[in-house]
Image: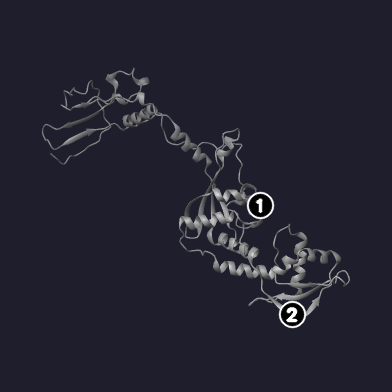
Amino acid sequence: MDVDAEVSFSSAARNVGTPSERDPDTSEDVIDLSFLESDEQSDVSSSTRLVEFLRDSEDNEEEVTLRFDIDRARDAYANSAIVLQVGPPSQGDRSSDAPLIAPEASVANTDDNDKAADALSRVIGKGDFGLMEILAQFNRGFIIARRRMREQEDEEASLAKAMDDLFIVDQHASDEKYNFETLQQTTQIQSQKLFKPLPLELTAADELLALDHLAVLEQNGFEFRVEDDRPVGQKLLVTAQPVSKDTSYTLKDLEELILLLHDAPPGRVVRCSKARSMFASRACRKSVMIGRSLTTSQMTTIVRHMGTMDQPWNCPHGRPTMRHLSNISSLGTGVREYRSRRVAWEKLPVFDA
């Protein structure tokens, strides 16, 4: 039968014997909780053990009185944790050998993007973006990603375990940089034929460089006719110039392209500053905007694309794409240790029915 019970707590405790005994002064039933005590505490006399009482008052059957010793409960709980060989995850200390990410790469650095890019490039490779775990979207504008190194069965295992970091990725800036580099690599700028070819006057080195990179120059909208019988430096004639709805190009842009080709690594497509500005504007308009909610699949695509970029650290307008949030290797180590601890089942008390 269900009854309303009044429960009262008291820090007082009495010395009793077996669970079947009754206190002669109060007629209260005694519950012996000595089974919670470890083997190390078994030598303590039962007459000094703290116990709890639970009884029905003889005067009022609806009244239940519980006398509870909070110190004893705390000790019993701590003792049971020792018996089970479990406990809360330890924070642990980060290995002194663990590679630290420079503070310039953190979210605290809002002034120097060049130093941040340099710091990030030293600790993140292109392959890392393919291994990052997408955790969540923050404030409908940022992606929280986790970079965790795979554990290795070798002498560097402890170092690998220590590399567990959180990064925050700007969803618009990173998507914009991907679209920008894609436009850079794939766009063929339209050309407009000239009524009369324009002869060029170049140095011998510049002319030779232009002849070796005619395909790159044509991708930028400039077309040429080569006349081998003309003097050195005057063999190239411009027959077409790039044209765009909002941008006009001149021979100054061709000179800029030739200058960029001197320092460009083999295979890289170079663009003049006007073309870069045009691509940046197009990439911005077609990219994911701040304020848009993304699915996990969409966030994963954005982060994976960063691994295909030449320079994934800043968007074409200079906005940073990512920053380091925190190292959580010590937390991960504590959880791994906590989960791997063995439970000493043989030490658990056996309860008789």
Q: Is residue 6 left or right of residue 245?
A: left
Q: Residue at x 72, y 69 (%)?
A: 218
Q: Residue furthest left?
A: 59
Q: Which mark is residue 276?
A: none
The residue sitting at 51% across, 63% down in the picture is: 290
Label 1 – label 2 distance at C-alpha? 44 Å
Identify which amino acid the numbered label 1 is placed on: Asp
Res. 207 image quadrant = bottom right
Q: Which mark is residue 118?
A: 1
Q: Position of residue 124 (x, y in %)?
A: 61, 48
Q: Residue at x 59, y 49 (%)?
A: 127
Q: Secondary structure at mark 1?
A: helix
Percent x, y of residue 281: 60, 69
Split into 4 quadrants, where in the image is the N terminus? top left
Quarter of the figure with residue 353: top left
Using residue 329 as the reference point, say whether residue 58 is left or right of it.
Answer: left
Q: Dots 1 and 2: beta carbons under 8 Å?
A: no
Residue closer to the observer: 3 or 45: 3
Q: Check disc 2 and report the residue beneath it.
A: 194
Q: Is residue 325 visible?
A: no
- The kind of residue tagged 2 is Leu
The foreground one among 13 and 317 is: 317
